[in-house]
Amino acid sequence: MDQKTRDELLKLFQGKLNKAMRFYLETCSRCGVCTTACHVHESMPHVKYIAAYRAEIVRRIYKRYFKGQGKVWSSLGEAKELTEMALEELYEAAYSCTGCRRCMVYCPFGIDTQMIMSIAKLLLVGAHAEPEILSMLADMSIEKGKTLELFKEGFLQGIKNLEEEVVKKWKIEAGDTAIPVDVEGADLLYVALAGAHSIIPAAAIFNAAGENWTLSFFEAVNFGAFVGDPTKTKLILDRIVNEANRLKVKEVCICECGTAFRVMKQMSGKQPFKVTSITEVHARYIREGRIKLDKTKFQEPMTYHDPCQIARNAGVMDEPRYILQHLTNDFRDMTPDPRYNWCCGGGGGLVALGEETLDFRMKSAKVKVDQIKETGATIIATACENCHTQLSNLNDHYKMGAEVKFLSSMIADALV
Ligand code: SF4
Ligand code: SF4
């Protein structure tokens, strides 16, 4: 690596050194408590999968360049040069971590390994050594934000086709708009994923609840966040923030996508609208008596997988359970509880990388499979696209014989 590249990367590193990050980088006591907290290590016991070990790779570069006695640390073997080889280690550490933050809730100092890994990902982006596909997908989302007029017509035509299905299946009154788009003054802006599965059930439920809603032109997923590029993350997020402000909505509701929800909730800043997950909205409709569910629709034992970015990292834990009380007579919660729930192994961009990560994802989520099996459930509900894909892959790989379902699709199917 030439000096100019190294200097540029170190500048990026420096930009991440706020007070919290410095605390995380300087505090680890090497107590080892996090060793058994990570699903990757618990499923594949190897030192490189210990949370503190991953962090140490970043920490050593920090000590070398940002601590007063970098040379002393080097002589103790505690500091590391930023080289091509170091980048390879950073890649392995960052892309074997799903950012689930389970290690953080066990760490006595609350050290956020996911945040430390965000430095690793940023350095990889700076060195153009990140997974290219994630950056390309992020660029496509950004481009869509700049050229909305070009794809508007095609999008509206696609929605018209979906509308027919909503009208037919949920018997909407003829003449009513089943999927409103671009409605100024709507109360709620729904931001879906690309795909009918994310739009049709949601539309059925909004209509049943009598919601004054409108669908976003943009998809919720934020590939900028997966690849750890703060600039792209913000540009993708801004498309939705600007749309919400243009339409003067009171609420932005994010579909079943954990990362999209957490990014929107925690990074959109002070806005004139509130941000909710679709699970919170559905629980609200049930509480207010705006929708009713047929509890006999799903007879099989059912469990719920808490998406890390929605539950542990954004606090939405009671709402899905409240919905499940109204959806089934046989809900079987997993142990341990949502705060300590095992990650499914699909986050951090790993599912988005598809086949490339499949083998690792299957091996690293063995503890999740065991946790699900213990419930005896044959329906696995969840509220995140990534988790749904990963759980479906696990279901096939481990021949679990279960069915993986989106919570929202079950709510739509059980509407009275
Ligand atoms: S639990 Fe926290 S302090 Fe202990 S080794 Fe892990 S990161 Fe370090
Ligand atoms: S954030 Fe999750 S995947 Fe990453 S080290 Fe911690 S427990 Fe493991």
Image (cartoon, helix red, strand yellow):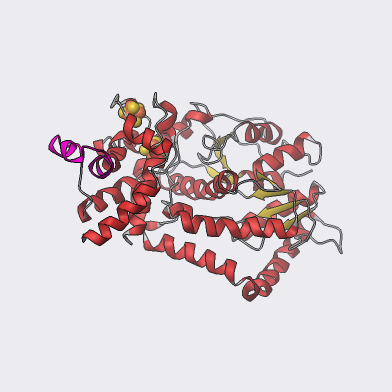
* Quadrant including the N terminus: bottom left
- Classify 56 as above or below 157: above
Q: Across the whole image, how many numbered discs are drawn on residues?
A: 0
* Quadrant including the C terminus: top right
Q: Main secondary structure of the magenta part?
A: helix
Where in the figure is residue 241, as x and y percent of width and height?
Answer: 64, 55
Please tell me whether residue 63 belongs to the stretch shown in magenta.
yes
Q: Quadrant of ligand 2?
A: top left
Residue at 55 percent across and 36 percent down: it is 311
Residue at 71 percent across and 33 percent down: it is 326
Where in the figure is residue 106, as x and y percent of width and height?
Answer: 41, 26
Compare residues 333 and 329 and report the one nearer the observer.
Answer: 333
Q: Which segment is the magenta one?
A: 61-79
> Can residue 39 be seen by looking at this rendering?
no
> Can residue 44 be seen by looking at this rendering?
yes
Where in the figure is residue 251, as x and y percent of width and height?
Answer: 72, 48
Compare residues 213 and 161 and report the one nearer the observer.
Answer: 213
- Classify 227 as above or below 287: below
Residue at 73 percent across and 54 percent down: it is 203
Where in the figure is residue 349, as x and y percent of width and height?
Answer: 43, 52
Please tell me whether residue 381 belongs to the stretch shown in magenta.
no
Residue 218 left/right relative to 64: right
Q: Quadrant of residue 67 in the image?
A: top left
Outermost residue toward the front?
Answer: 68
Residue at 39 percent across and 49 percent down: it is 15
- Classify 70 as above or below 359: above
